[in-house]
Structure formats: structure tokens, C-alpha cells
Image (spheres, rainbow, N blue to C red):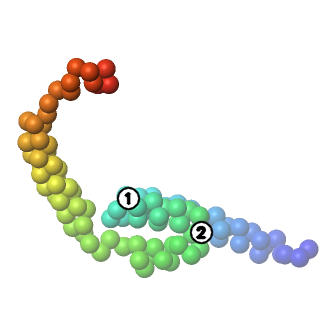
């Protein structure tokens, strides 16, 4: 036999453990990473190749900008208010289509 059964058992167990840790870290990344793009990228890499991604996640995956999501939400809310007020001003200038184009109106 080329490979000892004990060595194969240890390697198999280590592989299962590393993949389980990768799945757990992927769940952590989905819940805690700053952006949805980052969460998707980390979760795919942690599940696909955990031997490389887990050490990288330990080094690079920490949330260093605690206020990032809150700032993003507040900026989005401000832009939504501007958009909504602009839209309500523009809707005043809405005109009805001519009768010959009424058939194209949904």
C-alpha cells in the first residue's frame, strides 16, 4: 500500500475540519463584513478553497471600519430625501399625453 491508513485518516480528518471551519467563517463573513460584495467574495472563497482563504480572512477580513455601514445607510437616506423631493417637484410638470397617443399609455 502506498499510503499508510493512519496518515490517510489524519489527512481526511484535517480536511473535514478545515472545510467546516471555512463554512463557519463564511457564515461569519456574511453576517459581519462591511459590504454585500465583500461578504459574497469572502464566503465563496472560504467555502471553495479554505486552506488559503482562512489565513487571509484572519488577516484581512476583520471589520476595521465600524461606522462604515451606518455611514452608508445615512448617506443613502440623505440621497433618497433629495430624490424624493426632486421627484415631487417634477411631478407637478406632468402633462397628459395627446389623444392620438393614448393607445400607447399603459
Q: Which dot marks residue 36?
A: 1
Q: Position of residue 60 (x, y in %)?
A: 41, 77
Residue at 22 percent of width and 20 percent of height? 99
Where disc 1 sits, the SS reads: helix
Please tell me whether mark 1 or mark 2 is closer to you in this view: 1
Determine contact: label 1, label 2, CB under 8 Å.
no
- The quadrant where residue 70 appears: bottom left
Dot 2, crowdedness within 10 Å: few (<14), some or many (≥20)?
Answer: few
The C terminus: image quadrant:
top left
Drawn side of residue 77 relative to residue 92, left or right: right
Residue at 47 percent of width and 66 percent of height? 42
Quick one: 89 or 21, which is closer to the camera?
Answer: 89
Residue at 33 percent of width and 65 percent of height? 34
The N terminus: image quadrant:
bottom right
Drawn side of residue 6 relative to residue 70, left or right: right
Q: Write down the residue under mark 2.
A: 49
Question: In this figure, what is the number of numbered marks?
Answer: 2
Amino acid at each position: 500500500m502506498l499510503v499508510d491508513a493512519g496518515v490517510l485518516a489524519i489527512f481526511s480528518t484535517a480536511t473535514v475540519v478545515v472545510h467546516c471551519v471555512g463554512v463557519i467563517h463564511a457564515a461569519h463573513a456574511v453576517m459581519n463584513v462591511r459590504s454585500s460584495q465583500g461578504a459574497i467574495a469572502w464566503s465563496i472563497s472560504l467555502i471553495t478553497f479554505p486552506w488559503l482563504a482562512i489565513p487571509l480572512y484572519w488577516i484581512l477580513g476583520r471589520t476595521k471600519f465600524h461606522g462604515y455601514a451606518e455611514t452608508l445607510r445615512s448617506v443613502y437616506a440623505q440621497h433618497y430625501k433629495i430624490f424624493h423631493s426632486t421627484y415631487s417637484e417634477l411631478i407637478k410638470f406632468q402633462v397628459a399625453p395627446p389623444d392620438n397617443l393614448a393607445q400607447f399609455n399603459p
